[in-house]
Amino acid sequence: MHAKELVHDFDVDKTSTFGDCEACIVAKQARNPNLGIIGILSIAPGEMTHTDVWGPARTASISSAKYYMTLIDDYSRRCTVKFLKHKNEATKKLQEYVTYIERQQEKLPKRLRADNGKEYVNAKLIEWCYNKGIQVRGGVMA
């Protein structure tokens, strides 16, 4: 700007050297590819599902649901949403989803990734997954 005389009444010290600021350097850095939250990439659809429950919403849906559960396939990033009237329906909805993957898509789910919400950390769900050979991962559950 100074060389093209676009700025007037501005003194430039021509002896000083300019370097990139730290923020500029960090912004330009290349990042390694994301290898998934737990460092394992799925090699086929249905192998690993990320899940979480959100709610309660202030306003209930048409079907009176105040919660929803997201189920995201790690390989395809396909997202399925299940509506819940109560948070304790999460185990049943997760079991229905896994059964759908097994029967309709003919895939064998291997891992579930969830937070440590009470809807996932319960004996019924952990035992069901254990009997099916599905690893449940998330915080202390891993």
Image (cartoon, grey):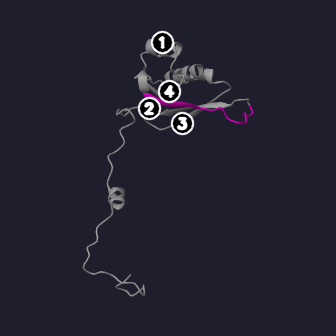
Q: Which residue is mark 1?
A: 127
Residue type at numbered disc 2: Pro
Q: Is residue 110 visible?
A: no
Mark sitting earlier along the chain (2/4)? 2
Q: Is residue 70 visible?
A: yes
Residue 138, image x and y in percent?
Answer: 44, 26
> Which label is found at residue 45?
2
The magenta region covers: 46-62
Residue in front for this viewpoint, 121 or 61:
121
Q: Quadrant of residue 24?
A: bottom left
Q: Which residue is mark 3?
A: 79
Residue type at numbered disc 1: Glu
Q: Which residue is mark 4?
A: 105
Label 2 to label 4: alpha-carbon separation = 9 Å
Residue in front for this viewpoint, 38 or 132:
38
Label 3 to label 2: alpha-carbon separation = 12 Å
